[in-house]
Amino acid sequence: MAEPVLTIEHLTKEYDGQTVLKDVSLQVHEGEVIVIVGPSGSGKSTLLRCINALEDIQGGEIRLRGQKITAGAKNLPQIRQKIGMVFQSYELFPHLTVMNNILLAPMKAQKRAKEEVQAEAMALLTRVGLADKADSLPRQLSGGQKQRVAIVRALCMHPEILLFDEVTAALDPEMVREVLEVILQLAENKRTMLIVTHEMPFARAVADRIILLDDGRIQDDTDPEEFFESPKTELAKRFLQSFEYTRTRKSDD
Amino acid sequence: MQSLGVEVLFKGKNFARLMGGMWTALKISLVSIAISMVLGLLLGMLVSRKNRVLRGVMRCYLEFIHIMPQMVLLFLVFFGTSKAFGWNLSGELSSVIVFSLWGTAEMSDLVRGAVTSVPKIQYESAMALGMTPAQVNRYVILPQAVRRLIPQSINLITRMIKTTSLVLMVGVVEILKVAQQIIEANRKASPNAAFGVYLTVFLLYFLLCWPVSLLAKHLEKRWG
């Protein structure tokens, strides 16, 4: 098998003496879409943040194509350019137009020519249906539109892997679909992605592998079919049940 | 009706002298404001970092400047240091030093407040795009901080302009001093000159500070 894009080995993360991630090991291969699910507080977002060195780690190792990712290292900006991250709260830069939000990092961090990036940005904006918003300010956009811009902003850096951190959790229900469809499209184009989400039908549709994280540990690592149809572990069963609702009706007697 | 005493301003070169005084006051404020804005921005950015020593030193500096009345500081620099260190600072230079010390302290505190008010996750998303910390500050954090800074820093600027009326105490012949001289010289001929002349000084200060306030309002609206 080819060398994995991302390798995580025995990752341990502690917050104020509390262990949030315990001995997490994971390999992500080219073109693979991995969805991380789990109850809130299980360490899903922390895992993504560790990959980008937004959190320092207390043990283990994270490598992107063999290059070690260390918080505070000199080459960290270069490595981060290869890791696209999309946040729950979009985090567009409020003082810049949509186009300038997208252009900033490719021009400043990668020193690419404006015309070239602009053409690419425009093509991507068109693909996500936002070509007419290029000159708008973020505050003039809806949540779903902002999130699509954030995805385009990450894509324009030509990342090797994309991290999605509960990107629809802050959205109104009717805007969730427009964002998830963009991500589905990316999956069809064989993008390597790590996705944290609470949208189970989406997880099932987009994932090549599902990882269940609970209490800071990987509890299950399997294909979506099996995870949703015949979960093996007790934890997986209980987790999936938490998405089902039943009403106990009193029988008329 | 008694005269308001404005007429003395039209005698001889009185009005031109008054304007000259205003220019002196304005010069001191402009130079001090320019120094304060630049140094305050740099210091404010530095203090926003998590360096304990730097923060401690800046705290002392800030407290000292906050507590010290500007006039005492002015006397300390103009009279105090010239005896102590044997140099001969002009009144204008002393004023610029004192106003810059004061302005830099307040400005750096405003900058620190504005920078730390930009949410941490804005840094993170900019860092995640692979920009260096310097690029993140320059293109993402500072522009947002500056927008938050505008109202308070304009307030500081107008306070600095107004407070130049103290520098006559160290022998600088600025607008208020010129006004006093004009009133003194015409005490016999126009005993009411004080009212008219000081009213004019008041209006001139207003004319200096008002456009600055207008600019602040305009910027606030544009960047809302």
Image (spheres, coloured by chain):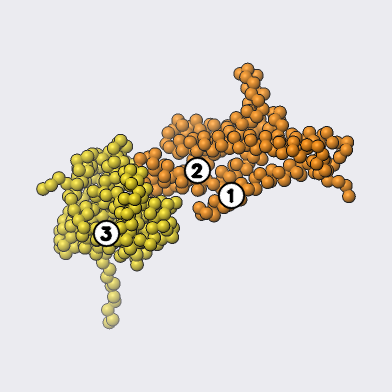
As drawn, the label of residue B113 is 2
Residue A1 relative to residue B31: left or right: left
Residue receiving disc 1: B215
Residue B106 or residue B60, whichever sits in front? B106
Q: Residue at x 37, y 48 (%)?
A: A104
Colour orange maps to chain: B
The extreme top residue here reads: B86
Measure how far apart labels 1 and 2 are at the Cα level.
22 Å
Q: Earlier in the sequence, mark 1 or mark 2?
A: 2
Residue B90 relative to residue A198: left or right: right
Same chain assignment for discs 3 and 2: no
Q: Residue at x 69, y 38 (%)?
A: B22
Residue A49 relative to residue A67: left or right: right
Q: Nearer the viewer, mark 3 or mark 2?
A: 3
Measure how far apart labels 3 and 1 are at the Cα level.
45 Å
Return the chain for callout 2.
B
Say if residue B166 shows up in the picture.
Answer: no
Q: Residues within 10 Å of mark 3 (few under 14, many from 20)?
A: many
Residue receiving disc 3: A183
Residue A248 relative to residue B33: left or right: left
The answer to which quarter of the image holds residue A52 is top left
Q: Tag 1: residue type?
A: Leu
Secondary structure under the numbered disc 3 in the rendered image: helix
**Count of residue discs:** 3
Return the chain for callout 1.
B
Colour yellow maps to chain: A
Q: Tag 3: residue type?
A: Ile
